[in-house]
Amino acid sequence: MRWRKIGKVFDPSQCALPAGCVGFAQSPQTLVFDDFVRVYFSTRAVDTSNGKYRSHVAFVDMTHDFSKTLRVSSSPVISTGNLGCFDEHGIFPMNVVRIANQIFGYTTGWNRRVSVSVDTAVGLAISNDDGETFQRHGDGPILAASLNEPCLVGDSFVRLIDDIFHMWYIFGLGWRRFEATDQPDRIYKIGHATSPDGINWTKEEARQIISDRLGEDESQALPTVVQVDGQYLMAFCYRYASDFRTNSARSYRLGFAWSTDLLNWRRDDSFPSFPPSVGEWDSEMQCYPHLFTLGSDVFMLYNGNAFGRDGFGLAVLER
């Protein structure tokens, strides 16, 4: 198996984004319709009160071959959270799942802290209008920090398989200053939880399901899972915990793992391999993958340099 890159298919600078957002189309997540594909993504607006970014979720509708943009949402699909709530300062990312005649949106809410920059938790929002808008299923999270997962729970990817909801997500091990003068950096790993209804979840508390490649300080993010030839393929991104923002040698790359039972995973980043491009939009960084199927084909959307500032691209799995 190998990935064939189709190239960048969406550039946020080439369209009008909602809510005063400027650039970024991070963590693309699909909802497939009969005659188009809706891709939800997180974009950013500047908070005029402090000059910091807030993440908002928008969508773009594209043809099945991703050659044409049909529509970009005129407003965010969900507002940021209320004062003091877990998603007060942004939502990034949001994973969507069709459940009967509704669409469940699993959000990652961000809230700013004092000693460290942020904390996150997973929320649930539900759409009754085919994914145009979402309403919160309460103001609190459905998955958050716990005794052995002390911070930074987020990046949920949910699928209903054999009447059981499975969620792959990340949990933080903590924050660390790698140099005395540096701001703290975070370390997080991929975990797994299950649910009978998609609302009430049971974690495999603090069980890291994907092995490290870069050592114990490796950070792993945004798991996504699809079935391929009787097995399950997970894509995710990983990086060094420090000096990753501008040092391309330590920035995000895509990793892969395989499972037959959805519980135990064998990591193999070379199968299928996904080498970086040379001199292209994804040459310095590859991050935030999303696996999905169209017909019999398996596709992957992903972001490139600068954490998706310039949009997202597409690849197809050839086997």
Image (tube, rainbow, N blue to C red):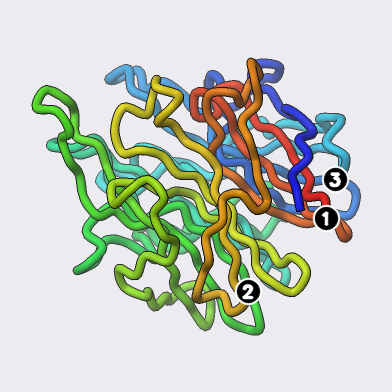
Q: Nearer the viewer, residue 277 or 170?
A: 277
Q: CA distance from mark 1 to mark 2?
A: 25 Å
Q: Which residue is mark 2?
A: 160
- Tell me the quarter of the picture where residue 248 sits: top left
Q: Is residue 102 above or below residue 49?
A: below
Q: Amino acid at mark 1?
A: Arg
Q: Nearer the viewer, residue 63 or 275?
A: 275
Q: What residue do we see at 59% from left, 71% from top?
A: 259
Q: Amino acid at mark 3?
A: Phe
Q: Which residue is mark 1?
A: 319
Mark 1 and mark 2 lie on one chain; the one further toward the N terminus is 2
| Badge 2 element | strand
Q: CA distance from mark 3 to mark 1?
A: 25 Å
Q: Is residue 58 left or right of residue 293?
A: left
Res 22 seen here: yes
Q: What residue do we see at 47% from left, 42% from top?
A: 92
Mark 3 and mark 1 lie on one chain; the one further toward the N terminus is 3
Q: Nearer the viewer, residue 309 or 132?
A: 309
Q: Which residue is mark 3?
A: 36
- Tell me the quarter of the picture where residue 40 sits: top right
| Badge 3 element | loop
